Image: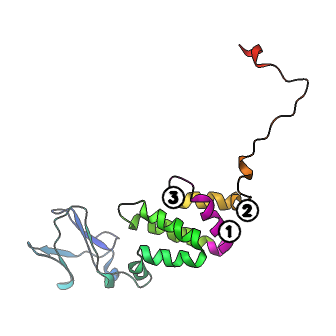
Amino acid sequence: MQKISHVYLSVDRNYYSVPHRYIGHYVEVQYNNETVEVFYNFQRIAKHQRSFRPGNYATIGDHMPSSHQVYNQWNPIYFEQRAAIVGPYAQEYIRKLIGQYNYPELGYKQAQGILSFVKTYGTSRVENACKRALSHHKSSYQTIHNILKNRLDTLEEGLEQQTFHIPVHENLRDTSIYR
């Protein structure tokens, strides 16, 4: 058994969870066409419906440590509700972030990270960062992080698009010189 919370059944190329207290112990895996059973010291510690879809993870919530069981509550609605507390732009940004993936789970950690910025930057700055970032093609944690880190959320809209010209002086050359 590896130091992970799942045993790997190489025949199916699938992973099956075991209770977290058995991580790092050697276990025996028995399987048939319908079930996969995991034993430790001749005691069955886990039983799963066998999956024939390669790369599948079969996880029983009780097998996870209590500190990880909160992840079972994660879904798009959970994150949208948390983002709504920050504001409507944050809610829309989180919805867009999670919605861009075929598997919404891929966006959960980024959503969690964005919402955790409230502790450091406060709700109004995170809300303003989400408002600014909504115009970007792809939503990501990194986009919000960069906006907050560079204080772009505090700039007035359109201000950063002003162009600053070099003042006219005697050292300027005509473009025809470079031909």
Residue 2 picture location, percent across and down = 31, 69
90 relative position to 29: left or right: right
Q: Magenta stretch? A: 118-138
Residue at image coords 58%, 79%? 85
Q: Which mark is on residue 139?
A: 3
* Badge 1 amino acid: Arg
- Decide which of 97, 34 is in the foreground and name it: 97
Q: Is residue 136 magenta?
A: yes
Residue 38 pos. (x, y %): 20, 78
Crowdedness of circle 2 by 10 Å Cα count: few (<14), some, many (20+)? few
Mark 3 burial class by Cα count in 10 Å: few <14, some 14-19, many 20+: many
Residue 109 at x, y percent in the picture:
47, 68
In depth, the one of 39 and 154 nearer the eye is 154
Which residue is pictured at 35% across the width and 70% down the height?
3
Q: Is the residue under label 2 in contact with that under label 1 (CB below 8 Å)?
A: yes
The residue identified by callout 1 is 125
Rounded to the nearest angstrom, the CA distance separating label 1 from label 2 is: 7 Å
- Name the amino acid type tagged 3: Ser
Q: Which residue is mark 2?
A: 154
